[in-house]
Image (tube, helix red, strand yellow):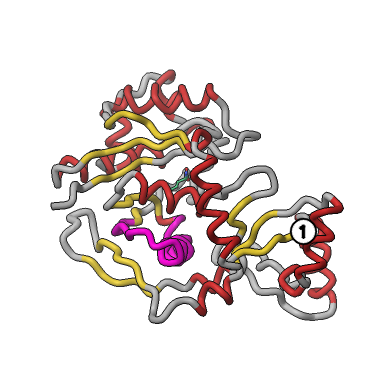
Amino acid sequence: MTLLTFRFAPSPNGDLHLGHAYSALLNRQLANDVGARLLLRIEDIDSTRCTPEFEAGIYRDLEWLGVRWEEAVRRQSEHFAEYQVALDRLIAEELVYPAFMSRGDIRAFISERERRGRDWPRDPDGAPLYPAIDKALSRAQRKARIAEGVPFAWRLDSAAALSRLDRDLVWTEFEDTGLSATRHVQARPQDWGDIVLARRDIPTSYHLSVVLDDALQGITHVVRGMDLFHATAVQRLLQQLLGLPQPAYFHHGLILGPDGRKLSKSLKDTGLAALRSAGATPEDIRRMVGL
Ligand code: GLU
């Protein structure tokens, strides 16, 4: 029998807010309901934005909320060597290519196209898809640029990746918090184009480390916000390419701010530490998120 395992995977790049509280409390509650483990993962690959202070804040806030997790905590920044192994495999299989365009280059390229009256395709988050310029470079041209020291990221060759699939890609999504009924969602990774799998400075990216860690930690249930619903398509594709097991997903509704928009880490009045200093109790937080 598989051990059921949930995870809460915050990034220590800001204070936890009500949206995180909802996700953490829901994971804890659902794990309890089905007798599963709950693991905590610190998603800190971005060393420019993640800090030990924010990480300490995560533990403090979760403990205050009464959310318990099973040790040991997995901190992604300690596992770059494991991500590198998977990246090397994708490089060897020619499923990724070096992408040299900087953000500025991409912006300039796209605004030039748009000036000429062509709408540039966007991903489900609204970001422009990566132009197919670098993919067209020959092996020799790539080598020469790398030898010149031009910085590059590794991007997924989505066309090559999709051609590897022999049938439709779907994922299992729970219909509600009862976790009894599921539906199959058709994954459309092509909507994301050639996503970054390893950033310029590190051998990984959000998507690559999430799928590897979910597999390494034996995660069977991914419960996270609806804002990551469409990203699941990319993660399913990577699981398929890397031969990883697939968890089932539940994407919960988002807690919205007073302006009806998604909460952001900069919104002071919904941060858990700020609410606690203003006298809120863990029970108040549960009430505020509807649990
Ligand atoms: N680290 C991500 C975040 O804080 C969540 C990743 C996930 O749950 O897959 O938004």
Residue 5 in the image, given as x and y percentages of width and height: 25, 45
Of residue 117 and residue 92, the one placed in the foreground of this image is 92
- Answer with left or right where residue 86 lies relative to residue 67: right
Placement of 233 over or under 272, stated as above or below: below
Residue 90 in the image, given as x and y percentages of width and height: 55, 61
Residue 234 in the image, given as x and y percentages of width and height: 48, 64
**Which segment is the magenta one?**
227-250
Of residue 208 and residue 280, the one placed in the foreground of this image is 208
Of residue 86 and residue 15, the one placed in the foreground of this image is 86
Specify the amino acid type for callout 1: Phe
Residue 255 in the image, given as x and y percentages of width and height: 40, 46
Quadrant of the image occupied by residue 9: top left
Is the residue indicated by label 1 positioned so its CB lies within 8 Å of ligand 1? Answer: no
- Answer with left or right where residue 129 lies relative to residue 227: right
What residue is rendered at 46% in x and 62% in y? 238
Identify residue for label 1: 100
The answer to if 238 sits in the magenta stretch is yes
The quarter of the rendered structure image containing the C terminus is top left
